[in-house]
Amino acid sequence: MTAIPSSPATDVNRRARFAPPAWFNLFMIGVMAFLTVVDLFATQAILPALAARYAVSPAAMAGAVNASTLGMAASGLLVALFNRSIPRRAGIVVSLAVLAAPTALLSYAPDLTSFSILRVMQGLCMSAAFTLTLAHLGERCAASASPAAFAAYVTGNVASNLIGRLIAAGAVSAWGIDGNFFLFSALNLAGAVLAAAFISRAAPKPELMHDQGPPWVALRTHLINPQLRIGFAIGFLILFAFIGAYSYVNFVLVAPPFALGMATLGLVYFVFLPALFTTPFAGAAAKRWGARGAIAGSLALSVLGLALTLTPNLPLVLVGLAVVGAGTFFAQAGATGFVSRAAQSDKAAASGLYLAFYYVGGLVGANVLGAVYTALAWPGVVACTGAALFIAAALAALLREPGASQETSHAHA
């Protein structure tokens, strides 16, 4: 993945002859996203096995697994504050390399507390790489190309949800829980190697990196922007609902009347496959209908999908989960791109804030909906997640597409 810096026309033409095609850049953006967050949701696929290993309730185990969202939120905020002093490429490479350590150590976690701490450490590393990559894309992509670049990145996120869960379920069945975490540690190292090989070393344009005073000034600027606040709230609600739907549905599927085994439960996550094909079009949808229409419409569709998960018919439940996944990922792509476009300066701080709100939403969802599941079972979870998605869709109707921002380069990473 390369970026074409400012240069004389002849130099640009020479570089262009050797530049990879746009589809290759978008593909590599997606692969980087996959390797960055593959650990985040893959562990959800083995929640029943982990709950049995530690002899704890589903809610307690889900809370420990989703403790990574606490690290994700904290890291997003830290990167928002200190991003100006963090080189993009080096920060991404180091974050992914360090991530391999807590991932491997999960194999040795003796209790739920140590497991939770290691998941928080994973979240810190994943979010740092995630936020810096979003900033890298926002600083390099032209306004016309950024929706496609962010859609490609979120598509890689979708792939991590599908393929990561399949890998985890299959690895636990074949090699046990310990073998699973060693395998994911190797994937973390592969991500670091890929980032080192493909992320451009060139600095972004100087006008995007000029000093704007203390870092908290940028945070205040973003937080008083009403459009960005709406974007942050939408991100919070999206992951609140997503965590709820896909954490606790595992326990529904392994219980009667479905009674699925671990290997079969892993296959259930093919419900994310449609999202792999729909999410890349989120950029085009945002350009045609604006973020408002793309996000509101996809979230409204997700609410309908949730309703299908209340039936005792497994095919209908799977269709409902597929619709929820496609809708929420489509909305996530739209919201991520909107925040980057709406932030006229210090895009890394805006992306960091967005991810902080997004992952706090996941943390709240894991804990609040765990209590709801314990008290009201799956119908209560569906009611709460549906309400969250409905509110997010209503907020999306208030979004206003920002004016054309200064273009920097094509969708290259």
Image: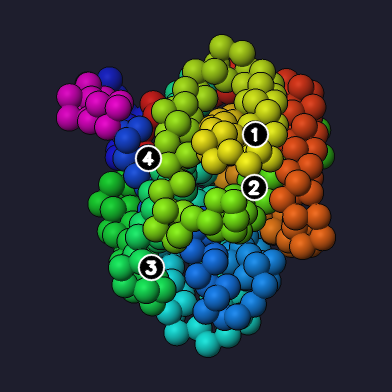
Q: Which mark is residue 172?
A: 3
How much space separates mark 3 and mark 1, taking CA atoms?
Answer: 29 Å
CA separation in Å, label 3 and label 2: 22 Å
- For the residues labelled 2 and 4, the Cα–Cα distance comes to 27 Å
The amino acid type found where label 1 is placed reads Leu
The CA distance from mark 4 to mark 3 is: 29 Å
Q: Quadrant of residue 216?
A: bottom right
Amino acid under label 3?
Val
Which residue type carries mark 4? Ile
Q: Is residue 377 above or below residue 351?
A: below
The kind of residue tagged 2 is Ala
Q: Earlier in the sequence, mark 3 or mark 2?
A: 3
Q: Which mark is first along the chain, 3 or 4?
A: 4
Residue at numbered disc 2: 245
Residue underneath mark 4: 29
**Which mark sits nearer the N-terminus, 2 or 4?**
4
- Which percent across, then down, holds residue 109? 50, 83
Q: Which one is closest to the eye, mark 1 or mark 4?
A: 1
Viewed as shown, does residue 101 lie left or right of 345?
left
Quarter of the rendering containing residue 155: top left
Q: Nearer the viewer, residue 103 or 247?
A: 247
Would you say residue 14 sits in the magenta stretch?
yes
Circle 1 sits on which residue? Answer: 308
Give 214 or 132, whichever is nearer the viewer: 132
For the residues carrying marks 3 and 1, which lies nearer the camera in this image?
Answer: 1
Whether residue 84 is visible, yes or no, is no
Provide residue 118's location: percent of width, then percent of height: 54, 75
In the rendered structure, are the residues bearing label 2 and label 4 in contact, judged by CB atoms less than 8 Å apart?
Answer: no
Quick one: 235 or 247, which is closer to the camera? 247
